[in-house]
Amino acid sequence: MTLTIGVDVGGTKVAGGVVDDTGAVLVQVRRDTPAEDVGKTRDVIIEVVTELAAGRAIDAVGIGAAGWIDASRSTVLFAPNLAWRDEPLRQYVSDAVGLPVIVENDANVAAWAEFRHGAARDAEDSMVMFTIGTGVGGGIVLGGDLVRGAHGIAAELGHMLTVPDGHQCGCGRLGCIEQYASGNALVRFARAGARQEPHRATALLRLAGGEAEAITGPMVTAAAQGGDPVSSEAFAQIGRWLGTSLADMAQILDPQVLVVGGGVIDAGDLLLGPTRRSFADALAQRRRLPVADIRPAELGNSAGVIGAADLARRL
Amino acid sequence: MTLTIGVDVGGTKVAGGVVDDTGAVLVQVRRDTPAEDVGKTRDVIIEVVTELAAGRAIDAVGIGAAGWIDASRSTVLFAPNLAWRDEPLRQYVSDAVGLPVIVENDANVAAWAEFRHGAARDAEDSMVMFTIGTGVGGGIVLGGDLVRGAHGIAAELGHMLTVPDGHQCGCGRLGCIEQYASGNALVRFARAGARQEPHRATALLRLAGGEAEAITGPMVTAAAQGGDPVSSEAFAQIGRWLGTSLADMAQILDPQVLVVGGGVIDAGDLLLGPTRRSFADALAQRRRLPVADIRPAELGNSAGVIGAADLARRL
Amino acid sequence: MTLTIGVDVGGTKVAGGVVDDTGAVLVQVRRDTPAEDVGKTRDVIIEVVTELAAGRAIDAVGIGAAGWIDASRSTVLFAPNLAWRDEPLRQYVSDAVGLPVIVENDANVAAWAEFRHGAARDAEDSMVMFTIGTGVGGGIVLGGDLVRGAHGIAAELGHMLTVPDGHQCGCGRLGCIEQYASGNALVRFARAGARQEPHRATALLRLAGGEAEAITGPMVTAAAQGGDPVSSEAFAQIGRWLGTSLADMAQILDPQVLVVGGGVIDAGDLLLGPTRRSFADALAQRRRLPVADIRPAELGNSAGVIGAADLARRL
Amino acid sequence: MTLTIGVDVGGTKVAGGVVDDTGAVLVQVRRDTPAEDVGKTRDVIIEVVTELAAGRAIDAVGIGAAGWIDASRSTVLFAPNLAWRDEPLRQYVSDAVGLPVIVENDANVAAWAEFRHGAARDAEDSMVMFTIGTGVGGGIVLGGDLVRGAHGIAAELGHMLTVPDGHQCGCGRLGCIEQYASGNALVRFARAGARQEPHRATALLRLAGGEAEAITGPMVTAAAQGGDPVSSEAFAQIGRWLGTSLADMAQILDPQVLVVGGGVIDAGDLLLGPTRRSFADALAQRRRLPVADIRPAELGNSAGVIGAADLARRL
């Protein structure tokens, strides 16, 4: 049995783990991310790997990070929440720890984890995953491999155009799906609903101390699970848009499995019910032709470590 | 040098050709399609293949047809313009002509032809192609192979959602890209423009005998090339929507090359200028990151024969 | 008690009646419209008036017709379903019958009837009415009078923009409300639903002999009333768009009463339930501020005769 | 010659003036608005009126304020930028200064000023005005009077629905015209353009110290007038949406004149050119039928004082 190390570099924490070939995480460590300091973030990654590797036979290291990674999986071109710009992370870490290293985008890593050891582990060929965080990330597996694109930047699913002239996205355009199916959109819909119809959002507003502007994503989830109508409708809204985008992916790539990940899936059918209905509506003209089913992700916060470690195994 | 036969089965004609491994068409034959009669269409295909194969050493036969083809490339599940439903075309033709046969969707075939011997022949890995006919078809090449999907039905690019609650599509939904970037959309935009502003559509209306309802696609192309403002704007409209969808594909799959085919490309920059501007606008946030360029298809009506023959070569 | 005559000139019939000052219709006659012949249509109107006036003391005559009427209520500028272009109808009929005559647009006439003797008879000042036929017509009363506009062409409510780049309207633009809240839209939504989900439209398809293309408005109403899901959803769709437009009118004109007329109101709450919910959603930010309520029209097919007669009374 | 006083209560200043029956402002005073203190704002209004009335024969006082005013023009129901809620302003000021008082919404006051003494002074009957500030306000004159609505809240033109599921409005809904044709929208479009295409916004970015987020409305106007492409396009974008809404108003009310006011009209044809083109496109189906022309407002910042004084004259 070979062991590899996976490292998940987020905006607030660096998590690392030793993972075996069944996807089991044998040991895990976690450090705060010194996000504003490029050099220190690298040092923390090296500390984490060194600590995990001590006394173990490790074959390779995989690192997942939010950002655009180049086609050779070596350099972080741009990371919105970290200070990296054209950071040659692979070389740096490899030199420091003396092991082969691979760097990959975090949404790709999560998709790979679900494909290999999670919700799509029965699929041998293809999967598309939407990861719903504050934004919307994507990962695509075809022919048993991640689709990385000619320039390393495929699967940017969050910026598909959804509503022409719609809500302005952080990227500058109007109407990206990220503005309709993300955690931020969930909160925006819930706040608007609570302002407009406070009597139907009493449970939600109680959690937020009476202030619509204080509403957060976990509050919407908690209130929706308790039956709060405005909170449930906020999930239904993002679910409907998500179903439409999943249908686009089914028509473009026709994968074996579609996966939805991220904290919002804690809401269960409150999210996935409307998602599946809007997906089915959008594909009604295909009638009896088979289509992928939509599954919630299974690996939660461990997906980053498991996926990065498994990618390292393939070096 | 090996030879294969490619057959392009359209709603009005069956074209076949003997093609060598450079993509050159050595001989060609053409018959009318007896579209309403399943049996006769098969017979015409067999006649065409038999005639072309006579006296030549042929390795295999590829057939392209408009319709949904199953994942094993054997059966036409549904062909909107032909009478086929679950037609086991591969077996039937193979038995009749004694050669290996492969059946493929026509837009996939055209994309394959451009990838191997046309506008994207310098790309060794990936390409996405939109074929603009009366509708919108698509073909995707990744890792040097056509993406066919888990159920054989990938690359249905014409039915990506573009305008929520928009123009009704033949498939029943509102707002598919086919309603905004197809030849039918071109004609619809031109007719509306000519009705609204006849004084800016004098050249176009002259071609149509003064009747907006009599305007056809070739008239719009001819008038636009002569400087007719309403006709040029109709091309600009479909170009803008097409650019948006191409940008979606760049973000989803990040291919090496993007290709636009179909009769509308005769309009040249009248179409591709607005297409490229809207594509660049949609991707402006990627700044200096590289992205595929958009090229017109090069093989025209021969793409069907060349692509089908080349796919047969890979059996 | 004074009596006036109202005439309702439609595309298929000319209806006339003698009406008293309570809005009661004392006598009525009805003729087929010779729609293609300008002269004969005028003759039929004169016949109807002459027959009704015989032996009675009539003060004046009102005529309602589908079309654009000039600001002096004398001339039919354009009537889409009749042959009239710049027809001086008022002068012609007045000369022939020897009575004062007024000509008015049919949707205005219906609105006036509901304001005076129908659903808004308790309102003394203001009302906005949408008439849902194959298209969408409108009528506005402010300060106790019809709003006719500086050029006689106000209240063209059917062509308010609703969906940018949306479904193409007969007027040439994309996205007019007429394409989302009319009888034609109801049928379009129902046909699309029946094609996409035939198993949820069994009752509707039975009425249509199994053919989605054969579905008509009355079939959708009948099936919806019997519980057919696709038919109910078609009403909900037009209701949602209608509620949005009613909310726009509440914000623009803040009338005492909003009225919805036309054959679709036979569907009752199947239409007006979704209409009222979408109206309330759109105005939620007004909170406790009062707003007009939405009422179904009460006078049905008699509105044309009653309204035209009442307008004549005010000459 | 009679004199009246007009007071314009804004979020930052209270302006007052003595106005004669030709609309000339004879004397003017100006104070800062103590916006957070209800009592002090009333006191400042009374000080201003008292100072202006001293030694003059004043007939009445008109007050314009941003907010919802009740139907009897007495009470400020809600003022978003002031502390007033259900404030009986008319009674309070009248008691203090011993003169008849009328209270009116500020956008209505500005519209009335333009109707009586400004851009629409040749119109005797009807006018619709859009006032483009940070938001979008409206005023409607029909039959020579302001349309105030059954509940005092007509002419809320800023919240007409323009893009279904579009940009979120401060009122909670998605897609109000205020999000597409306001000063805030101008800035949003300009910032997005400068972020996406900085090389086409060099003049604008220079004014903003290189920071897209520092761009303000006056910078966009200045840069557009100097030929900055991104700034000009920002004006064209709001102009196109504004033209669409003006076309809706032409179809709903068919007024004699349409007026556009607010600081953005300093941009002249950069705004009004695209506005008029989109207006004409939207009404193309009316062909030769006459329609109002679109004029820029003429009274600028004095409209509030002049309009309020003129309304007082009609008490």
Image: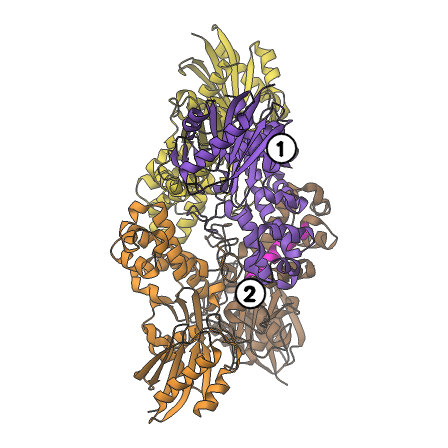
Chain colours: A purple, B yellow, C brown, D orange
Front in this rendered view, residue C271 or B43: C271
Relative vertical location of residue A87 with respect to residue D156 in this rendering, above or below:
above
Answer with left or right where residue D312 lies relative to residue B97: left
Residue A72 visible within the image: no
Both marks 1 and 2 on one chain = no
Residue C37's disc is none
Residue at 67%, 54% in the rendered image: C218
What residue is disc 1 on? A292
The kind of secondary structure element at disc 2 is helix
> Type of residue at label 2?
Gln
The kind of secondary structure element at disc 1 is loop
Relative vertical location of residue D290 with respect to residue D102 in this rendering, above or below:
above
What residue is disc 2 on? C285
> Type of residue at label 1?
Ala
Q: Give the magenta-colored segment's residue range.
A: C231-246
**Mark-to-mark CA distance, 1 and 2:** 41 Å
Q: Chain of mark 1?
A: A
Q: Quadrant of the C terminus of chain D?
A: bottom left
Front in this rendered view, residue D86 or C289: D86
Front in this rendered view, residue B55 or B87: B87
